[in-house]
Amino acid sequence: METLTDPRIERIAWQTRRHFLRDALGGIGSIALASMLGQRCGADPAEADSGVVDPLAPRAAHFAPRATRVIYIHLTGSPPHLDLYDYKPALVKRTGEDCPASFLEGRRFAFTSGVPKLLGTPHQFAQHGAGGTWMSDAVPHFHGIADELCVIKSVFTEQFNHAPGELLLFTGSPRSGRPSLGSWVTYGLGSENANLPGFVVLISSGVQPNGGKNSFGSGFLPSVYQGVQCRSQGDPVLYVADPPGMDRRVRRLSLDAIGELNRRQAAELGHPETATRIAQYELAFRMQMSVPDVMDISKEPATVLEAYGAVPGASSLANNCLLARRLVEQGVRYVQLFDWGWDFHGTSPGEDIRDDLTAKCRTMDRPIAALIRDLRQRGLLDETLIVVGGEFGRTPFREGRTSGGTTLGRDHYPDCNAIVMAGGGIHGGISHGATDELGFTIVEDKVHVHDLQATILHQLGLDHTRLTYRFQGRDYRLTDVHGEVIRGIIA
Amino acid sequence: MPRTIVISRSLPALVVAVLWAARASGEPAPAPPLDFNRDVRAILSNSCFRCHGPDEKQRQGGGDSGLRLDTPEGIVADLGGRVAVVPGEPDRSVLVARITSRDASEIMPPPEAGPGLDAAEIALLERWVREGAPYAVHWAYRAPRRPALPRLESEREQAWAKGPLDHFVLERLRREGLEPQGEADRHALVRRVALDVTGLPPSPDDIDRFVADPAEDAYERMVDRFLAKDGYGEHWARMWLDAARYADSSGYADDPPRTIWLYRDYVIDAFNRNLPFDRFTIEQLAGDMLPDASAEQLIATAFHRNTLTNNEGGTNDEEFRNVAVVDRVNTTYAVWMGTTMACAQCHSHKYDPITQRDYFQAFAIFNNTEDADRGDESPLHEIWTEEQLGRRAALDARIGADAATRDTTTPELEAAREAWERGLPGQPAWSAPDVVAARSEAGVTMTVDPEGRTVSSAAGAGKDTFHVDLDLAGVRADGTTRLAAIQLETFADDALPNRGPGWNNGNFILTELRATLVPAVAGDTDGARTITFAAAIADFQQGDYVAANLAASPIDPAKGWGVGGGAGGDHRVTLIVSEPVDIPEGSRLRVSLIHQSPHTQHVIGRFRLSVTGDATAREWAAIRADVRAILQTPEPARTEAQRTALAAFHRSIAPELAEVRARLDAARAERAALTPSATVPILRERGQDRRRVTRLQHRGNYLDLGEEVGPGVPGALNAGDRPIRDRLELARWLVSEGNPLTARVTVNRHWEQLFGTGLVASTEEFGSQGDLPSHPELLDWLAVDFVEGGWDLKRLLRTMLTSATYRQSSAVPPDALRTDPDNRLLARGPRFRLPAETIRDQALAVAGLLSPKMHGPPVKPPQPSLGLSAAFGSSTDWATSPGDDRYRRGIYTMWRRSNPYPSMGAFDAPNREVCTLRRVRTNTPLQALVTLNDPVYIEAAQALGRAMRQAADSDGGRIEHGLKAALCRPIRPDEIEVLRKLHDEALAIFTSEPDAAITMATEPLGPLPEGLEPADMAAWTVVANAILNLDEFLMRR
């Protein structure tokens, strides 16, 4: 087994890197050093020769991967899956009846007590695509790409509050402190573009994810693996812009001076970290160009902007979907989107699962459909894994606090949820798993969020039981001691 | 070369041992004797303990209880004729047979369990068995004894060594055939000591004083000067606050601010006054349980109130209280014992002798405090200033005196009451019309009870309006033909929260009562009359939510009438009609009760409307129902209690006492508005009669409970016979002499701060999965010396700082990178990147901007606005603190867990959600972007640039000044030349771009002083920015 933290392997890496750096300091000047910084050497033998160990250099997967990149679109707050994908005609018929006691005994819900009323979906459902995938009228743009989508209708979790639910989904543990999915992936595989971060985070609708930065943090992994938040307004990456008044010429001059003095320091003390710093400053200089460039969607053709519904300069899920495509196109390993505003309780204006849900979905299904079509057209979909979903499902009954009102909403529900996947070696046009006729329990092919994690890693060629990191005396992994790959959805 | 990011991770000591063994085998010298803990335990632990270790549930292999390799009894146990280890006889030992087997079904460890043993490991285990399989308790669980100092064997060694610690280092170097480095130059030393001790660079005066000091003990005196500075506590508190997971917010999704900075100040002060570590320990873990605990000792207990609090709606406080207790157990054992307890929460530890029962014994010790994941963070300790206390006493005195006056009946007041009562008109007759229809706009079901009271069945969607149609026929039949006042009664009700009368914890806020008199003729809209009100008087009202708001014109929907503080009682408001109107026959009254308050769900639960034609209603409106009843009773028939109540009520309205009442109200309001100058959450032990029962939690699930467990500590950790039943006894045991770990773990953590890596590299893990110490005897010597020296931290640091080992030059001899890249053998001085806070503090200090102000609430230095807010919480952006607070040391920066200060996060500061005992040190391009471009660093560059410009007459002198300020050493001409070139080239560019020059020179620091040229100062800013980005500046050498 090759654990990435095997001390013996690490030992070799350290020795060889230092060997190289010492040699580099001996003779190679700044120009040569800078010219070597362009692209990643990859896993080719040249790297072993150069002896450089870059924590973000591409690493070989455990086995042949089906996907090389991930775009995970998280709908923060959790959309009502029963109104989008999991059609329950029997529940519709029984709308307004008391919730059967057998479903409530010994259970706790976040905001519902007493006996709530069953609530069938107010949306119209139909089957779409050759695979006959059920979808509601709230996601019309998905109808035309139904055969690209795999709808898992049997996802479950143990957590029924937002922050722990989201942390379990993204870090494998409901408590903060563990590395997130994207950081595990970049730790396991590195990234292909040396001029961009390997793990990029894009946030829309103005609110951080429930788990705060933990949802894209690196936990106990080194911080190079944490998600780098990029923005479509202001500095795309914090401090990436030169200070006001300084142009590129001046920055270049100052980096040359810094590099020159640092090389004297390195020659005097022989400390390898100094050489590393010289290289990092050069990389920073190039990131200052490459990051704003990739984040600038204004040069996209009008037809592309139109397809996504993206508007240059705005902050929206549409813009972020388009940016996700641009980033994976550039070899970014893992792109994580968070979009706030899916917590449809029905307790406030704008939270009704009828028109309000339809309106919110309009900002979501169009850009995601455009993204999937765009990737397909560019030949990238097969190697790009797309995941869309929330941290848990929502109840088949009406949220308890709203029972007297006119707004229809649903409470949090950990037992059943639906997640959509596409591309990346996942079977399109199928549904996986099933819930009972009222949507209270999973009756077929249960998929725990740890299974989902194991599957995402599997598509990337990583065995979730072997992707481990030693911390405080224990080998940790994303799936803790759980997780089974969902074989049934793999194409 | 692709980009390289160095992760300065510790090198497992195992590797040192293996390297060392490899070297030894390559030399003719005889192999040194095996040491079980150094050579064998790690192999067994890594490859065998998982299935043949302490966890009885996982244990595999023969016999009833399986094979155990983690005890000396286990390895030789006869398991049905098969014995794992027969000492001295590898051929008869099943262990050796299995690890050397070629049969895939026989080989141990089984291939699916992980990496197999390599040839060297197999050879070691065989040799161990052959040599009699000596077994030893894990080294860290044996109490340390003071080892004898190794002898120095040559004059050179004697000349080099400066303290006891150097003996151990030299002995090891001698064994390795290595030579230590000589002492670093004085400039390097003074900067190293200043940064290590105070986290700040030395001042020019500090440097000159040391460099010029001819005394023999110049170095020691310099160390003492820095140890005496206030900056010492501010710097070393940082390490402890990482361990204590100190932050200024509560964590989880909304992550609201938390006021707990008094604890941060306690830690700073504890370091500065050199509070012995044993007392520091006891105060933080159990200060509240000390007899006559002082304010400071209570504040110290906030150590364990740094756990997260979950305020997200719908969460279970008990669940998250449990999470906090778990965190307290894990943190305590990690910080003091270097022991990972977390594994044992769900199952017995797989590697160390800690059972799940042990875990919940530890849990029981912490399971007995009052705090319970509450939003208000109670219990709190309040700090009142002398001035506040004086004011409070004065107010209390005035309130007492005025209340006495108001509460005392005098003959004059008695006479006035009689006159008032005589003057009261007859009580108005109220008549409650029949409810024809009641409707809620939010769709809540409305019903009418047999007593004519309308009931709303649910709170609805936050805001609601009730429309009630009243038939006035019955009213007319009662003889009421005019409408002079409308009365709204609200009723307590068991079905409502807090017994009502409103839906929000019993409260409601009525923002408007709209009434229309509708004539009998259908469709006669012209005849409808809107009723306006001249006054509204309630028998009870809440603060600013006074009944008069209902008669205001126009109505303010943000106000209204509320009854907060009066939950569980009936309350009534009387609205006086401006111009009384006749009630035509057959007409109806339509009343709308409007709840539009921004405080949602404040809706009335049960109410009744009635009307009167009697204009005297106003006089009676403010009279409580019980007082009305007394007034109905003829005076001679009244009881003594009724007389007293009536007199009291009269005094509450008597004009004679108006002044006293007004003064009393004002004093009470001021008294209520007095808040402590600061609060801090603390631990408070529950009394003996309220102790919580602790039960084993299956798989760590707080709802899945097993047997009851009493308090205690794991037996394997050598607690001895004394019972450990509560936090105080636990704390005392942690710092008792027999404790094998606390002193070792503590000295190791301090060593790591100074040398970059601990003697045990896994600072947080001293169990069998941790690293072995690089210098075991040195670690034990330091630990014993620390305890015998009275747990004196400054003394400990002084011992390390004054050693020759610490004072070595950090230049790396070429060969050393190959033989000892991480400097575990200490053959050179330590050199590593500064911590996040120090990087920023140093830049501000060198620029002359750093504020020396200590203590107090957290400050908000500039950070970029991201336009985001926390989930269900407030914006993560902030307004920069005014004045010098933007230049305070990093330790005072507001630490919001969900959004740590970005530039510190870039330099590996943790988010402090959990205990962090070791920060990793990365070297990334994002760090370069911070120090190159963050406005904080640009501002520092501008200030340094201005200081440089004015420090000398020549450009060379100016550059020398800047470099010297940053690097604290003499500057070479060739270094000056590099920056002179940068200055000249930048100047040429800025001269041709005057607007850019002004921006570069002044944003954000501010306008240039008189006489300075923008282009020149822009160029100096660029030069200073380069200086503040030099590798030498970011490292401490």
Image (tube, coloured by chain):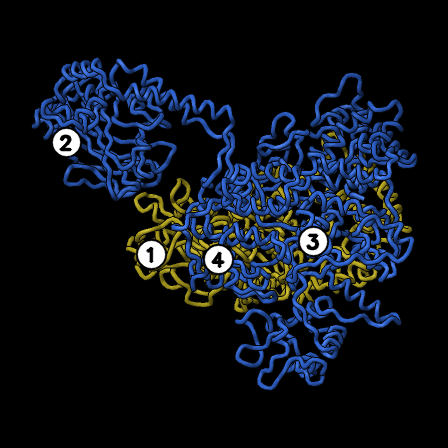
Chain colours: A yellow, B blue
Q: Distance between the residues labelled 3 and 2?
A: 86 Å
Q: Which amino acid does label 4 sit on?
A: Pro
C-alpha separation, residue under disc 1 versus residue under disc 4 = 54 Å
Q: Earlier in the sequence, mark 4 or mark 3?
A: 4
Residue highlighted by disc 1: A92
The disc label shown at residue B711, or none: 4
Vertical order, B977 against A102 (above or below): above
* Chain to which mark 3 belongs: B
Q: Name the residue under label 3.
A: B783
Tag 2–tag 4 contact (CB < 8 Å): no
* Residue mark closest to the camera, 3 vs 1: 3
Q: In the drawing, does residue B153 fall left or right of residue B241?
A: right
Marks 4 and 3 sit apart, C-alpha to C-alpha, by 28 Å
Residue B938 image offset from top left, x and y in percent: 73, 32
Q: Which amino acid does label 1 sit on?
A: Val
Circle 2 residue: B433
Question: Residue placed at 82% from the left, 55% from the top?
Answer: B167
Whether labels 1 and 4 share one chain: no
Chain bearing mark 1: A
Q: Is residue A446 above or below residue B911?
A: below
